Image (cartoon, rainbow, N blue to C red):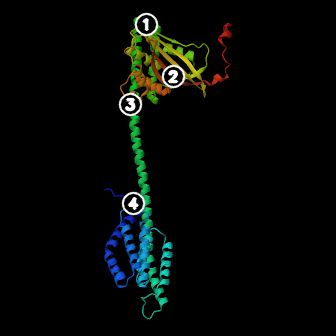
Amino acid sequence: MYSKLISLEETIDDALRKASKVLMLISLPALLLAAYRNLIIEFLPLHQISLTLIWFGFLLASLNNSNLIKIRVHLVVFLFFALFMFTGYRNQSFVFVDVWLIIAGGLMAFRQSLRIVFVLLAILPIGLLLIINERFKYPGIEYELHLAIHGTALLLSFVLFYTIRNVVQNYQTLYESQVTINASLTEENKKSYLRIVEGKETVNEERQRLKLSAFSLSSQMSILEKVVQFAKKNDDPMLLGYAGTRIEELHKDLLDYSNDGSYISSETKILSVSELAFSIEQYLRPFKAILAGLTTISVENHKILDLKFEFPINFIKIICHHLMENCLEELSPNKVLFDFQIVGKVIRNKQQIKMTCCIELDRGLKDFDPLKFNKAMENNQILKKSQSHTAVMKALVNRLSGKLDSSVADDLLEYKLIFWVNVFEENRQLTPPPKIRDIFGFE
């Protein structure tokens, strides 16, 4: 069963609103009777106006208006003090109207300290006694003694005020502790919910990463299987040995995956652009062997001497592999040319590298839409769909924090991959390489 926890202010406000409504209704006959006495018998219009205004004050306090929450207690206390003063002056008696003073003090105890209550309850009776001549006196008792006895009796009301104050403080402490507990529980529930959502997302991402890894492994094993068959058929022990070395590398990748969950290692190698191009050329040997006579595959770069960089070689190799597989599935390439170049200047010890893959086709580019490929590479939704070479390339490009797109120019399809690498620190200690004209002696 759910129970709403209500604050002290709301509890007091709701009780005062209902009490004001009841008091307003049951005091209406008394107001009418007082009007008859004050207007017809004795004709005291100012006193009657004051009582009427007090009655309308209780009417205002009984309204269910959110703007009255902060002032309702003060309004009701003021009305009882006003009722005490006006009726006391009208009847020329303090003893006759002290009940309004006790009620006002009890209401003040909900919000104010007992010291403030005592000061106000002392000032108002003294002020009233200065302007009236007490009519109700015990016979045979002096006036001062009479007031002292009655005042002492009224001090007993502070037992009630003290009780009210204790209840209020205990309720406030209980309410604050419950609010703190509820807030901590809400925060824990929120964190638990977020952990559950994050866990679901992590599981889905891990499942998708596993699917893409398995797809990439299957694709590489498939091409190596064709290479092994081709090497055996053509009695090429060097190619067969190369295929065996690649299979061992894949086996090592699987062992690493079982240990740390990372199928494709992000390990970097210190290479120049020329050395990177040579590594990619060796990596694409299976495609050269299988497509010999059908497709020419070559890797170029135009640097003789260049700086060293920290290349994530595994990412680049597998991107090239799936780029070739994607071309073979969707197109019939006649010639494929890879080119690696340095772009721009070094910025904060980082250098931008551009890899281009130019593809020449026999039957033109009518069946290929570069915009569709670019849209797929810009949207991570492709990672959540079925496994494909494009999805694997997208995942690896994200790991590189790079950009891969395609374009068509002069009947050539061009893929362009741009990514950043760290400059090898020892480059700073090396002397600048000589220029070509210094080597060969011409301009």
Label 1 environment density (alpha carbons within 10 Å; few <14, some 14–19, many ≥20) = few
> In the image shown, does 249 or 114 lie closer to the viewer?
114
Mark in front: 1 vs 3:
1
Q: CA distance from mark 1 to mark 3?
A: 37 Å
> Residue 398, position in %: x, y?
47, 27
Q: CA distance from mark 3 to mark 2?
A: 28 Å
Q: Which residue is mark 1?
A: 292
* Residue at figure coordinates x 47%, y 22% from the top left: 404
Q: CA distance from mark 1 to mark 2?
A: 29 Å
Measured as percent of width and height from the top left, residue 329 is found at 38, 15
Looking at this view, name the residue that lies furthest to the bottom. 140
Q: Which residue is mark 3?
A: 207
Classify mark 2: helix, strand or loop.
strand
Is the C-beta separation of discs 1 and 3 under 8 Å?
no
N-terminal of the two: label 4 or label 2? 4
- State the CA–CA distance, disc 4 to disc 2: 62 Å
Label 3 close to label 2 by CB (< 8 Å): no
Q: Amino acid at mark 2?
A: Ile
**Nearer to the camera, 375 or 310:** 375
Mark 1–mark 2 contact, CB under 8 Å? Answer: no
Above or below residue 336? Residue 354 is below
Which circle, 1 or 2, is nearer the viewer? Answer: 2
User: Which numbered disc, 3 or 2, marks the residue that appears first in the sequence?
Assistant: 3
Q: Give the residue number, with chain letter if any, for mark 4.
A: 66
Question: As shown in the figure, which amino acid type bears the numbered disc 4?
Answer: Ser
Residue 62 vertical placement versus 274 (above, below): below
Q: Real-space Cα distance between discs 4 and 1?
A: 85 Å
- Between discs 4 and 3, the one toward the N terminus: 4
